[in-house]
């Protein structure tokens, strides 16, 4: 009688298992440790389990499969079973009713309903994982405030330097160009009505209130969210995070909070810097296009532009920083053992960070407009 065999194969974003032979009680001794150990080590990956070459099952073989699937699901993996014979399928369904979560026995992976359903499930699963991630970091943030000696000041300063100070050149260039574009477009329209001086209010309010915070956050999302995801993801692949847990260090306390506090502190400073540079860009255009001197521009701004617009932009900045740091770190922890997943989750991280920054800015705009600020 042919022995029971099992083969494992790692592909790009998929882990393939092939079962072979007679999966009966007398044949399982050689593979039981192998399959259970594998089911405890593989984490957060799509698994395709092929039973095409299985000749016969008994209750022990079925229970071993159910136990392995239970372990895989516990590690955050999704399981797809294919090529299971009808009699084996009935046996599997019978035994799993009182033992295992619902199994996904795939018939048509190309079905659009399957793809929509899987995407929906993955979205909500990721959303609830993110909520849990935010809750964990809120807990450790409170812990850090109550135990200041646990706070990693050097790591935070380092991240302020890499995420903030080193971003100043690109932020300066971007903010200057935004100020130039807004002023130039406004000047051509205001000149038609002889309302040249109103360019001061237009540039100042738009830069202070919306453009400087938003553009700065988008630039930081592109730089920092991607780097956070790549750094943490690489540490996960090289098992540095597992080593930290083994030594009793919490990854949230050591990896996430320094990045979160760094952007929380740096973002308002970066936004203020962008405000100044954006105004300079507007002043240059106003001087050349409308003959408004720098002195006139500054005096008009001081007398006609309320400081609340500057404060609103600065108040938004820490929220943007928290969003970028949390999303970048969260996607880093989602990286799997394959190196391809770093590129995948880095891309997702940047897209998510930019989207939620814009969404947060829209929420701020609606609320502040409704309350008349």
Image (spheres, rainbow, N blue to C red):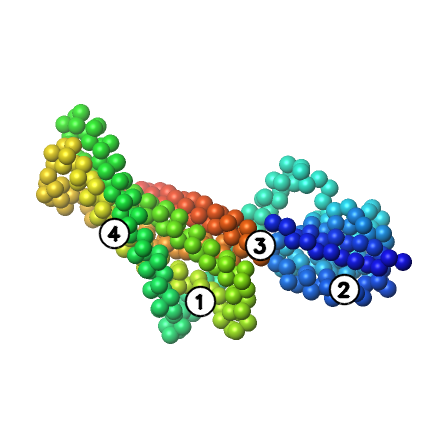
Instruction: Determine which residue is flagged by label 3.
Output: 338
Query: Residue visible at 14% across and 34% down?
Result: 288
Kindly report the distance in space between the C-alpha atoms of the residues bearing marks 2 and 1.
38 Å
Q: Does label 2 or label 1 sit earlier along the sequence? A: 2
Q: In this view, does 29 lie to the left or right of 126?
A: right
Rendering quarter of residue 160: bottom left
The reply to whether callout 4 and callout 3 are in contact (CB within 8 Å) is: no
Q: Residue at x 11, y 34 (%)?
A: 291
- Residue 40 lies, in percent from the top left, at 66, 63
The residue wearing badge 4 is 272
Q: Where is residue 329 in the image (x, y as percent from the top left)?
A: 46, 57
Whether the residues at callouts 2 and 3 have beta carbons within 8 Å, the answer is: no
For label 1, the crowd category at 10 Å Cα-Cα, with few meaning under 14, some 14 to 19 and many 20 or more, is: some
Residue at mark 2: 32
Q: Real-space Cα distance between discs 2 and 4?
A: 62 Å
Report the quarter where the C terminus lies.
top left
Q: Which of marks 1 and 4 is nearer the N terminus?
A: 1
Location of mark 1 (residue):
254
Q: Of residues 234 and 257, which is closer to you in this image?
A: 234
Tell me where residue 231 appears, x and y as whole percent. 46, 58
Q: Quick one: label 1 or label 3, which is nearer the N terminus?
A: 1
Mark 1 and 4 residues: CB-CB less than 8 Å, in contact? no
Q: How far apart are marks 1 and 4 (CA)?
A: 29 Å
SS at mark 4 in the image: helix
């Amino acid at each position: 009688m042919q022995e029971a065999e099992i083969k494992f194969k790692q592909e790009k974003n998929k882990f393939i298992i092939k079962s072979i032979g007679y999966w009966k009680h007398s044949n399982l001794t050689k593979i039981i440790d192998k399959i259970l150990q594998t089911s405890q080590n593989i984490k957060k990956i799509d698994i395709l389990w092929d039973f095409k070459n299985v000749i016969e099952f008994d209750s022990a073989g079925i229970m071993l499969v159910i136990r392995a699937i239970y372990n895989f699901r516990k590690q955050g993996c999704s399981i797809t079973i294919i090529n299971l014979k009808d009699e084996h399928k009935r046996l599997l369904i019978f035994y799993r009713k009182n033992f295992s979560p619902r199994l996904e026995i795939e018939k048509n992976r190309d079905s659009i309903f399957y793809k929509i359903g899987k995407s929906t499930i993955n979205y909500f699963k990721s959303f609830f994982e993110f909520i849990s991630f935010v809750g964990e970091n809120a807990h450790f943030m409170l812990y850090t405030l109550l135990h200041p000696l646990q706070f990693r000041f050097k790591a935070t300063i380092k991240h302020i330097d890499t995420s903030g100070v080193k971003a100043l050149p690109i932020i300066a260039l971007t903010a200057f160009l935004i100020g130039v574009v807004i002023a130039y477009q406004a000047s051509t329209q205001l000149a038609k009505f002889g309302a040249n001086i109103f360019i001061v209010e237009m540039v100042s309010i738009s830069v202070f209130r919306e453009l400087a915070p938003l553009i700065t956050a988008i630039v930081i999302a592109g730089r920092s969210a991607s780097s956070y995801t790549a750094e943490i993801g690489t540490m996960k692949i090289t098992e540095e995070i597992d080593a930290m847990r083994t030594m009793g260090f919490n990854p949230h306390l050591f990896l996430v909070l320094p990045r979160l506090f760094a952007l929380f502190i740096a973002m308002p400073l970066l936004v203020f810097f962008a405000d100044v540079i954006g105004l300079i860009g507007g002043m240059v255009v106003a001087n050349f296009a409308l003959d408004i001197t720098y002195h006139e521009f500054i005096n008009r701004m001081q007398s006609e532009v309320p400081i609340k617009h500057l404060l609103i932009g600065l108040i938004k900045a820490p929220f943007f920083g928290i969003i970028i740091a949390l999303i970048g770190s969260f996607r880093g922890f989602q990286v799997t053992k394959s190196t391809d997943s770093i590129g995948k989750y880095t891309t997702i991280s940047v897209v998510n960070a930019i989207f939620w920054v814009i969404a947060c800015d829209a929420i701020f705009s609606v609320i502040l407009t409704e309350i008349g600020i």
